Amino acid sequence: MRRLRNVKIVATLGPASSSYEMIKALFEAGADVFRLNMSHGVHEDIRKRHEIIRRVEAETGRPIAILADLQGPKLRVGVFANGEEDLIEGAAFRMDLSSAPGDVNRVQLPHPEIFAALEPGSSLLVNDGKIRLQVKDCGKDYANCTVTVGGTISNRKGVNVPDVVLPLAALSEKDRGDLEFVCALGVDWLALSFVQRPEDVLEARALAKGRAAIMSKIEKPAAVKAYDAILQVSDGIMVARGDLGVELPVTSVPPIQKRLVRGARAAAKPVIVATQMLESMIESPVPTRAEVSDVATAIYEGADAVMLSAESAAGKYPVEAVRTMNAVAMSVESDPTFRSVIEASRVVRRESIADGIVAAAREIAEATNIKAICCFSQSGTTAALVARERPHVAILALTPLMSTARRMALTWGTHCVITEPQDRFKGAVLAAIRAARDGGFATDEDQIVVTAGVPFNVKGTTNILRVAPCDERLISRVDPE
């Protein structure tokens, strides 16, 4: 009987993973989703990687999700006359709009919107928080600061402003161009950076026009505070722990991760845990024990996916990194403790007929020798609801739409199957048992649960459940049509 991993693996493509041979090797090693990082590479590079992914998809016959990660606005200091300066703790340092080269006393910060939002006492973090400044006084074109954590500051280093909501849109002009390009190309998910408020997500959704699902990256304190509202208007969530760890105390990131994952699970929306999961594998063929534990923790929390960034994009061992993640996932999910942890964290939500149907499907599967839950889904909603239950059997998501199958490739436990459109329930049952048998999930002697919505091809109508034998001869002629 076929045994597959439930948590999905997202692999970022880059200089180390741009060829057909490497991308196919990553897929065969266990990657379910490929991330295209719009912060790096020109459109032609992105197009070539997209074409290769679709070629691998056609050759293997398995839907692959493509996630385009938009860069978001980048806040950076200007340049220094000497290229760099050493800032000493306790010293005064000024940021302003002047384009004059910087020195040990000041540097340009070419973002008037930051000065408009700052207040005395606000913090400015430079170079991923390695340098910390506290604002003493400020105006519309300057901020006089005290260095609270010193270090070397150099040309065009990034700036984070954790204490205030910046009057900046999540989409820069570059992002708008990138969004249109990748949507026309045919990506399945858009990851939105610099989200601070739900309006940021709505703006991206309006531009995407339904061509891609919207995933909000939670990487700023403002997004953590507004999480419930952001989650409501998002299709998925990425826990971007790298930036969270810069703008918030690193000790606060683990509990935030747990809260974000649990919230997304309750909303039946996929959630990715990202950043530095196997960081040492950029240079080493084996991970540290702490990194393995980190990946395992995300899987025990019930995350839909775990992500590789530089490990697969620019590291020396991209395939080994995917294999390691796959091995960790298989080990965790075969642990008897995994089921008890997942079930203890399951959120009971019974607000609709669909909620009741998928809960019943999971309970029937747990109480009997059911081999799979097969759900027909036009939009992916039914499959997401079944996945929210985190059943102990395989979830077969059947859909006539390749776009839906690709998006569902990111959802926990789902194995996507393209099927003919159905307009009768009996035909749906026959299609489900054939998919279960052909996929190696069941034999003629087994039973499956089938869920669907009647009438077919209407979003949000999940209203029927059937326990079906996988031997077609046992399907009664009087079965409901």
Image (cartoon, rainbow, N blue to C red):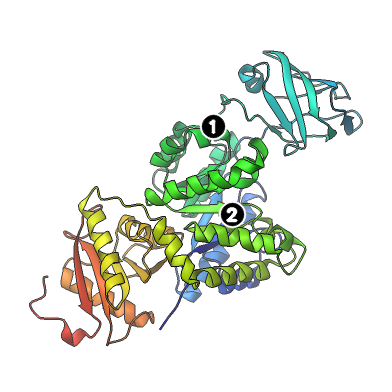
Does label 2 or label 1 sit earlier along the sequence? 2
| Mark 2 secondary-structure assignment | strand
Residue 140 visible in the picture:
yes
Instruction: Point out residue 323 in the picture as x, y percentages from the top left corner.
Output: 62, 71
Question: Residue at the spot x=47%, y=58% of the render?
Answer: 302
Residue at image mark 1: 222
For disc 1, the neighbor class at 10 Å (few under 14, some 14 to 19, many from 20) is some
Question: Residue at the spot x=65%, y=23% of the render?
Answer: 114
What is the quadrant of the C terminus in the image?
Answer: bottom left
For disc 2, the neighbor class at 10 Å (few under 14, some 14 to 19, many from 20) is many
Question: Residue at the spot x=66%, y=60% of the render?
Answer: 291
In this image, 463 relative to 129: left or right?
Answer: left
In this image, 242 relative to 226: left or right?
Answer: right
What is the quadrant of the N terminus in the image?
Answer: bottom left
- Which amino acid, mark 2? Leu
Instruction: Point out residue 254 in the picture as x, y percentages from the top left corner.
Output: 58, 47
Residue at image mark 2: 36
- In the displayed structure, 362 sits above or below 430; it is above
- Which amino acid, mark 1? Ala
What is the tally of numbered marks visible in this picture? 2
- In the displayed structure, 67 sits above or below 30; it is above
Instruction: Point out residue 105 in the picture as x, y percentages from the top left corner.
Output: 86, 21
| Mark 1 secondary-structure assignment | helix
Question: Residue at the spot x=45%, y=74% of the render?
Answer: 61
